[in-house]
Amino acid sequence: MTDKRDHFPQGFLWGGAIAANQAEGAWLEDGKGMSVTDCQPLRLKADKTDQKNLFKNADVTLEEVLEASRNMDETFYPKRRGIDFYHRYKEDIALFAEMGYKVLRLSIAWSRIFPVNNGAVNEQGLAFYDRVFDELGKYGIEPLVTICHYDAPLYIALDYEGWASREVIERYEEYVRVIADRYKDKVRYWITFNEIDSILRHPYDAGAIIRSRYTREQAEKICYQAVHNQLVASARAVRILHSVRKDAKVGCMITKHPYYPYSSKPEDVLQAMQDIRSNDAFCDVQVKGYYPEYLNIRLEKKGIRLHITEDDRQDLKKGVVDFVSFSYYSSTCSAKDASALPAAALNTARGILNPNLPKSQWGWQIDPVGLRIALMELYDRYEKPLWVVENGLGAVDEVDGKGEIHDDYRIDYHRQHIKEMKRAILEDGVELMGYTTWGCIDIVSASSLQMEKRYGMIYVDLDDMGQGSGRRLKKDSFYWYKKVIASNGDEL
Ligand code: BGP
């Protein structure tokens, strides 16, 4: 009898993750309306490690949005074409099934369901996701559905002030009621928002907020109000989903970056604790059901008075989540005085370079132990089941003369991170529901809008300009991950 402390738990949910705006394409097909991500232009090839430039791709001015809304071109708007998952989902799901997936994390494009503001529900949009869930069901793959993954309908940005407008809570609630009821027999696992903390860093795709409309100080207040409205919307979604399906499990999601003190100076240790609180703040609200006092104090110090009603406070209390999910790519450092320290590129953020860690081609530091640290910290903080819903390595992959892709660097990345997850479960007592690698298949990068930044275990023959056959090719990591899943994480 092998000791249960040697293996991942039975039923561990191995799989992968994609997002509608980065994978589906078909940006106006079958009645879909424009989304904010359909208006993000591919700018000149950004310097891979120039996070500001890459970051710029995610942000757009009002003029650029209006120009894009009049321009039907797809070439320079990569998220309009994605990898054509909309038409190729059967082939792609068959490949995920061949790897042995237990779960696929995907998102629903809100603008397929409600193409027009205050308009009718689009039956063709609903029918598409019925087909996708049915295809997953054929292989026994559970969907984990992100209700909004950066692609709110464009009217949320143009007819309102994005998520800073309270009416958007009602728009989201109407959307959730429709999909909760429609898919109650096909979807058990839900995430209310992708990386709810990211509005503060890139408000356009995360919050449908066009920052060029505001001054810097106005923009900060707008973003905090937008997060608050999303927190209320998330809480209401939890209750709707629970009311429609008793065994539904609804999670929150943040961009997790463990913060290490740059030195043992107490002020650096203190700064790391402050930064961890900043990273976890909105997760605190979604798990605990109220604003922690440190967050109230921080808002007061910024001179930000949020519009919070008593009903909001009741909503937050009644709509706490069932699990905590997060994306993990890298850790970073904290220092009281970082002015003379080298910066590090992070996932749509900037940190302090850790001299002890290697970097990816896009400058993101590679820290498998950081994933174990994140799991311990979040589990101690919340004592709720956790779920790693994004983890992966963006890299330039080469196809050799035989059509093979030898991505041993990606295998090593995942192998090291899975080993640390196993230690978190077996040695640190963390309750971990599952692991969905980011980009099970190459898709358009969220921040750089490139195809060149490949994360998948399945290669897609498309370049940054959308040129190529679109053919899917199995990378070496495809065969490796298949063995990992078949052995429930024993064979790494
Ligand atoms: C996360 C997003 C994903 C994914 C990932 C990788 O923040 O939730 O959509 O894109 O980042 O980032 P990128 O694609 O910019 O390399």
Image (cartoon, rainbow, N blue to C red):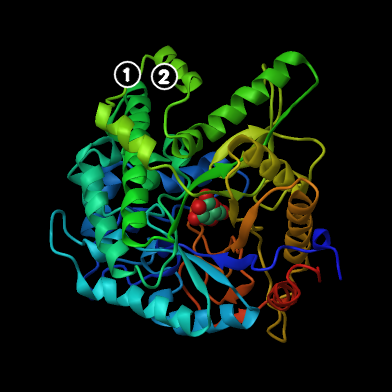
Badge 1 residue CB within 8 Å of ligand 1: no
Q: Is residue 374 left or right of residue 73?
A: right
Element carrying mark 2:
helix
Task: Give the spatial CA distance, label 2 vs label 1.
Answer: 7 Å
Q: Is residue 461 above or below residue 326?
A: below
x, y percentage for residue 414?
Answer: 73, 61
Query: What residue appears at the point 51 percent right and 79 percent down from the top-left corner?
Result: 93
User: Which part of the image, by quadrant, shows the N terminus?
Assistant: bottom right
Q: Can I make out residue 231 in this image? A: no
Query: What residue appears at the point 21 percent right and 46 percent down from the top-left corner?
Result: 170
Q: Which residue is mark 1?
A: 305
Q: Is residue 6 left or right of residue 297?
A: right
Most distant residue in the left direction: 119
Return the disc, 2 or 1, that comes first in the chain's sequence: 2
- Residue placed most toward the observer, 75 or 394: 394
- Residue placed most toward the observer, 142 or 453: 142
Amino acid type indicated by mark 2:
Leu
Q: Is residue 277 above or below residue 473?
A: above
Q: Which residue is mark 2?
A: 299
Element carrying mark 1:
loop
Q: Is residue 56 above or below residue 97?
A: above
x, y percentage for residue 52?
Answer: 53, 39
x, y percentage for residue 49?
Answer: 63, 45
Amino acid type indicated by mark 1:
Arg
Query: What residue appears at the point 58 percent right and 72 percent down from the top-left corner?
Result: 102
x, y percentage for residue 159?
Answer: 17, 45
Callout 2 touching callout 1 (CB < 8 Å): yes
Q: Residues within 10 Å of mark 1 (few under 14, many from 20)?
A: few
Number of on-image labels = 2
